[in-house]
Image (cartoon, helix red, strand yellow):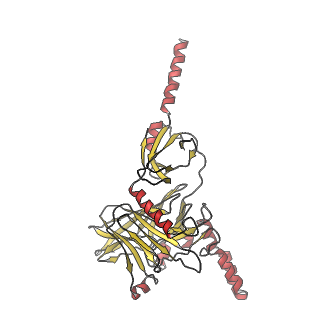
């Protein structure tokens, strides 16, 4: 009887071990280019079912050498983690029950009501903002995306930039100093301004009444239907590896219909220079052209490659010596046309003296998502010249059209 009891206990233990076997994820790269730190996604439901996890159980992700890999569970219940896979090769990762190590925050953001409702976000390489309802209520036309440049750090910088820029006490001291020492007042204001690089980043990109660094807009009778600032927002993911925000806009008038509502879902992953953006419109009754635009501030180098799905521009930045910003967009689906559109002198006055836009045009079908990617590099950070940027963009366009694939054992 005792032997039977012990055999039963042993069988139960073996069954329990079988139910908690690690899960192997094989990531395959179909391209002949190496891919490093690219996010892959696995359903959390599938992980839970395969590992037979209790509700409170945690997991760890390990590479082939057994090194723990950081991960995040997203708002739509996916486990994302960065994968590195050589050209035309596979890499194996293991997911198992365990207590993960803390993960350093690489992607995050929030609304800044203290700065006219800016929605600002960043990762370890780049930062961005979309202008909000408070700015629009003041009458300012800020249609496009703005850029926050970063260097010499992989840590979040936006909280510090905004805190200094909006320092009321410092600005009050500067106002007093102007009466007796204008030079000291100017130096104090420069020391807190986010328009000046203090060693780790700055805002020196001009947007104005344009599409800025990559906003997409419908085309109605050959004219861009400029979207104003967002109306409502919902932060869906806030790090440590992915930031996702959903923006909803006030109704647009398109084809005489004043009830067309735009929604954008913007996602920025750690390690990427580009945001993924899915744009949709409710109320639209017919197919229309949609254009992704990058504002032109001068006659800097432009590259448009519709066949391979990307476009780039070298922006001069504002200020005396802030380097060059390399702006670009990449497209998941084929685009019909990518071209430079220059403004007349009268149009320049209406658009903050901008020279025009690069526009990549596709067709938008009612009820669909228009998905594309947009972002930038800076010659004071990791992208040193336009050749490096064009190579990055060409490779990025290949990657989004040929994603990493996973199989689970």
Q: Depth check: 27 or 391 in front?
A: 391
Residue 116 against residue 153 in the figure, above or below: below
Q: Depth check: 164 or 354 in front?
A: 354
Residue at far top of view: 1
Q: Residue at x 59, y 72 (%)?
A: 202
Quarter residue 104 falls in: bottom right
How far across and down, in percent of the image, does residue 81 sit? 51, 50
How far across and down, in percent of the image, does residue 316 sit? 52, 77
- Please tell me how many numbered marks the rendered image carries: 0
Is the C terminus in the top left, top right, bottom left or bottom right quadrant?
top left
Residue at far left of view: 286
Residue 102 against residue 207 in the figure, above or below: above
Is residue 282 left or right of 405 when viewed as pictured?
Answer: left
Q: Residue at x 71, y 82 (%)?
A: 184
Residue 72 against residue 169 in the figure, above or below: above
Residue 131 against residue 9 in the figure, above or below: below
Residue 119 visible at all: no
Q: Residue at x 52, y 17 (%)?
A: 7
Residue 182 visible at all: yes
How far across and down, in percent of the image, does residue 47 sit? 46, 41
Quarter residue 203 falls in: bottom right
How far across and down, in percent of the image, does residue 96 sit? 52, 39
């Amino acid at each position: 009887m005792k032997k039977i009891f012990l055999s039963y206990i042993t069988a139960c233990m073996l069954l329990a071990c079988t139910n908690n076997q690690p899960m192997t994820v094989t990531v395959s790269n179909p391209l002949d280019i190496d891919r490093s730190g690219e996010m892959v996604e696995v359903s959390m439901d599938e992980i839970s079912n395969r590992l037979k996890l209790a509700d409170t159980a945690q997991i760890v992700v390990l590479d082939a050498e057994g090194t723990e890999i950081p991960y995040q569970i997203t708002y739509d219940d996916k486990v994302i983690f960065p994968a590195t896979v050589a050209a035309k090769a596979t890499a194996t990762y293991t997911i198992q029950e365990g207590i993960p190590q803390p993960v350093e925050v690489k992607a995050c953001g929030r609304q800044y009501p203290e700065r006219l409702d800016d929605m600002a976000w960043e990762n370890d390489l780049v930062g961005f903002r979309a202008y909000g309802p408070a700015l629009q209520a003041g009458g300012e036309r800020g249609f496009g995306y703005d850029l926050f440049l970063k260097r010499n750090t992989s840590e979040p910088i936006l909280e510090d930039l905004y805190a200094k820029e909006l320092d009321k006490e410092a600005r009050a001291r500067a106002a007093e100093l102007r009466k007796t020492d204008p030079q000291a007042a100017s130096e104090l204001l420069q020391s807190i301004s986010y328009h000046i690089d203090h060693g780790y980043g700055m805002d020196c990109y001009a947007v104005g009444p344009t599409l800025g660094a990559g906003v997409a807009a419908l085309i109605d009778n050959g004219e861009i239907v400029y979207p104003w600032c967002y109306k409502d927002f919902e932060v869906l993911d806030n790090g440590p590896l992915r930031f996702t925000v959903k923006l909803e806009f006030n109704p647009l008038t398109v084809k005489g219909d004043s009830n067309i509502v735009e929604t954008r879902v913007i996602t920025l992953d750690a390690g990427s220079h580009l945001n993924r953006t899915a744009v949709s419109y409710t109320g639209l009754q017919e197919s229309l052209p949609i254009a992704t635009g990058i504002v032109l501030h001068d006659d800097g180098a432009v590259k448009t490659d519709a066949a391979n799905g990307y476009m780039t521009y070298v922006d001069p930045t504002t200020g005396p010596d802030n380097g060059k910003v390399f702006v670009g967009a990449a497209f998941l689906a084929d685009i019909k046309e990518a071209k430079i559109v220059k403004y007349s002198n009268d149009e320049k006055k209406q658009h903050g003296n901008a020279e025009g836009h690069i526009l990549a045009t596709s067709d938008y079908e009612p009820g669909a998502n228009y998905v594309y990617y947009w972002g930038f590099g800076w010659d004071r950070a990791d992208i040193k010249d336009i050749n490096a940027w064009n190579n990055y963009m060409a490779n990025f366009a290949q990657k989004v059209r040929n994603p990493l694939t996973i199989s689970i054992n």
